[in-house]
Image: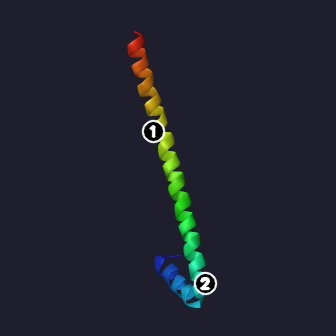
Amino acid sequence: MSIDQYHFHMVLRQQEMSRADRLAADEQAGRIAQGLSEIITAIARIGRRPARRVAAAGKLRRISS
């Protein structure tokens, strides 16, 4: 489906939605965005951990040598 077709269908859908339906869709989109943000943050933390461990291990080796 092209972006123009998608946009057309979304405009039609929004015209048929009630205010409550639109609010519910906005809340759902917010929860999805928050969840994705949490996942990205967790992945970033995981990616940084090994570098810290390696750096700390290197410091310990230098001190004990």
Residue hosting label 2: 20
Residue displayed at 54% across by 75% down: 26
Counting from the top left corner in percent of width and height, residue 43 is at: 51, 46
Residue found at the very far top of the displayed protein: 65
In the image, what residue type sits under mark 1? Arg
- Give the CA distance from mark 1 to mark 2: 42 Å
Secondary-structure class at tag 1: helix
Residue hosting label 1: 48
Q: Earlier in the sequence, mark 1 or mark 2?
A: 2
Residue displayed at 48% across by 40% down: 47
- 10 Å crowding of disc 2: few (<14), some (14-19), many (20+): few
Q: Which tag is nearer the camera, tag 1 or tag 2?
A: 2
Between 55 and 2, which is closer to the camera in this rendering?
A: 55
Counting from the top left corner in percent of width and height, residue 50 is at: 48, 33
In the image, what residue type sits under mark 2? Ala
In the rendered image, the quadrant that contains the C terminus is top left
Residue displayed at 55% across by 70% down: 29
> In the picture provided, is 64 more to the left or to the right than 31?
left
The image quadrant of residue 17 is bottom right
Between 47 and 52, which is closer to the camera in this rendering?
A: 52
Residue displayed at 53% across by 54% down: 38
Asked if residue 41 is positioned above or below residue 56 in the image, the reply reads below
